[in-house]
Image (cartoon, helix red, strand yellow):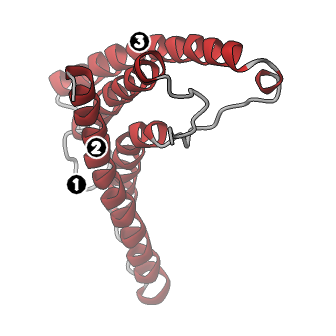
């Protein structure tokens, strides 16, 4: 196994590990919302931290799962026009659009990092009862975005080095 394959394997493992965090967050969100609804409907006791925590679970769950979606070819790709072109041109367009996505993600990571550090420096707390530091939720944005960039690099390099298709299909 060469160096590139080792790096790609580690990035794929990181994506899978983050997706486990995402699954846990989504499960906790569902459980917490269910408990909140039951508490409010049957016992007339609202859980005041429900919105606060479910929002944090949603952000962490979403940002943690993005890279795995790309790794497994599950991100939405519109191919109505591109599908009419030759495979060679399709691959070139896919690389081009992936490079644009990486550029946008780099800006996203930088800006979300700056936003998170600004919130941390201000000492902002969440708006609910718990008042936890809001940057605990916001830090998921640059982390998820960075892992998304890494997974895009694996995707592009797979086509270049291993001649894998870029259309989201797995190599056989």
Instruction: Give the residue pinned by disc 1.
Output: 130
Q: Which residue is at the front of the view, 51 or 27?
A: 27
Look at discs 2 and 3 and give the one toward the viewer. Answer: 3
Q: Is residue 40 above or below residue 78?
A: below
Instruction: Give the residue pinned by disc 2.
Output: 126
Q: Does residue 37 appear in this view? A: yes
Residue 114 image offset from top left, x and y in percent = 28, 16
The image's mark for residue 26 is none
- Tell me which label, 1 or 3, sits earlier in the chain: 3
Q: Residues within 10 Å of mark 1 (few under 14, many from 20)?
A: few
Q: Secondary structure at mark 2?
A: loop
Q: Secondary structure at mark 3?
A: helix
CB atoms of marks 2 and 1 within 8 Å: yes
Seen at 20% across and 21% down, the residue is 3
CB atoms of marks 1 and 3 within 8 Å: no
Asked where in the image residue 79 lies, by quadrant, the reply is top right
Q: Residues within 10 Å of mark 2 (few under 14, many from 20)?
A: some
Apparent side of residue 65 relative to residue 171 in the rendered image (left or right): left
Q: Is residue 112 above or below residue 24?
A: above
Query: In the picture, which quadrant includes the N terminus?
Result: top left
Pick out the residue farthest to the bottom: 42
Residue 134 image offset from top left, x and y in percent = 26, 38
State the CA–CA distance, disc 2 to disc 1: 7 Å
Asked where in the image residue 78 lies, by quadrant, the reply is top right
Apparent side of residue 82 relative to residue 7 in the rendered image (left or right): right
Asked where in the image residue 34 lies, by quadrant, the reply is bottom left
Seen at 31% across and 20% down, the residue is 115
Residue 28 image offset from top left, x and y in percent = 33, 65
Q: Secondary structure at mark 1?
A: loop
Q: Which residue is at the front of the view, 117 or 45?
A: 117
């Amino acid at each position: 196994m060469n160096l590139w394959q080792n790096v790609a394997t580690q990035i794929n493992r990181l994506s899978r590990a983050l997706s486990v965090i995402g699954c846990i967050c989504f499960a906790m969100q569902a459980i917490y919302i269910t408990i909140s609804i039951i508490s409010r409907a049957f016992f007339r006791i609202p859980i005041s931290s429900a919105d606060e925590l479910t929002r944090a679970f949603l952000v962490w769950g979403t940002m943690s799962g993005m890279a795995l979606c790309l790794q497994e070819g599950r991100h939405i790709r519109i191919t109505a026009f591109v599908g009419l072109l030759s495979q060679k041109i399709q691959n070139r367009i896919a690389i081009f659009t992936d490079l644009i996505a990486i550029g946008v993600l780099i800006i996203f990571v930088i800006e979300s990092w700056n936003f998170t550090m600004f919130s941390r420096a201000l000492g902002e707390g969440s708006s609910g009862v718990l008042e936890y530091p809001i940057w605990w939720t916001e830090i998921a944005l640059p982390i998820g975005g960075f892992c998304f960039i890494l997974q895009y690099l694996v995707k592009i390099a797979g086509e270049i080095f291993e001649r894998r298709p870029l259309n989201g299909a797995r190599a056989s």
